[in-house]
Amino acid sequence: MAFEYILVERTPPYAVITLNRPKQLNALSHDLLQEVSGALDELGGDDQIRAIIVTGSGDRAFAAGADIAELQALETADDGSQHSRDAHRIIFKIEELPKPVIMAVNGYALGGGCELAMGGDIILASENARFGQPEVNLGIIPGFGGTQRLPRLVGRTKALELVFTGEQVTADEAQRIGLVNRVVPQTDLMPAAIAMAEKIAEKAPLAIALAKRAIYEGLETSPRGGNELEMRRFGEAVGTADRKEGTRAFLEKRRPRWQGK
């Protein structure tokens, strides 16, 4: 698949998707998001790729938000709902992907950019990163999942404050409130993301996929229901050839050779 608004670089065992509209601060147009969706489909089916990094071109922005011109063109409530639904599908795809997705956030991650980052499994931020949900300044609310994922990450009261005021938070503050995993210097952002991807890629791929699924499924149910899900996913892991290889390698004091089976 040819891409116009993103760059895709495969460096097994990881791949990098770069949002590439630097003049628009990597604003999330419909076409860009569709390209991200297509890239996820391709990388999700590539057995050589064990982890995916998503970042933005340049050092000014990961993604400064949705494409305002596209928002301006929406005429009806139905148009708005469809616009939101299209974006949600792509972020759901990230969550449902059996491979881990690391967001490497450089510069502004505002509105849809913040929401895209929150759709990742791990968020690394450079020291110049800024996060926010400023949609109320445009007379709208977060529409790419922000009203749901933000409170799950930072808690209800902080999420309400950020959405109501539209204020931005620094990378350090984002880490303090639980929005990001780690803050690193700008020059260390991609090396840190790559190191994380390579570390995860050393683990059993089916175990990673099952752990990811159990966590996301568990967040949608009760604690007891979540534990029942874990029991089933654990059983699935035990039934794999990789589990047999992993325990055998441990007992034989050698590195395991994962087959993804």
Image (cartoon, helix red, strand yellow):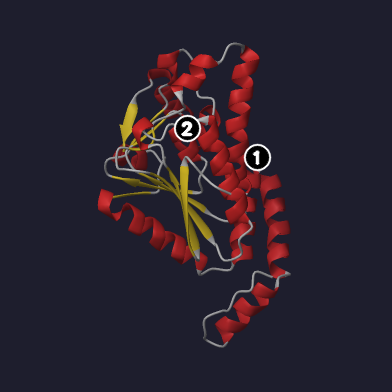
Residue visible at 58% across and 43% down in the picture: 37
Say which amino acid is labelled 2. Leu
In the image, residue 36 sits, relative to residue 251, either above or below, namely above
Which mark identifies residue 168? none
Residue at disc 2, secondary structure: loop
* Residue named by callout 2: 28
In the image, residue 182 sits, relative to residue 10, either above or below, namely above
Residue visible at 53% across and 15% down in the picture: 73
Is residue 99 among the parts visible in the rendering?
yes
Residue at disc 1, secondary structure: loop
Residue visible at 57% across and 66% down in the picture: 48
Say whether residue 237 is left or right of residue 194: right
Callout 1 environment at 10 Å: few (<14), some (14 to 19), or many (20+)?
few
* Residue named by callout 1: 220
Say whether residue 53 is left or right of residue 187: right
Q: Position of residue 124 (x, y in %)?
A: 38, 49
Callout 2 environment at 10 Å: few (<14), some (14 to 19), or many (20+)?
many
Distance between the alpha carbons at the discs numbered 2 and 1: 27 Å
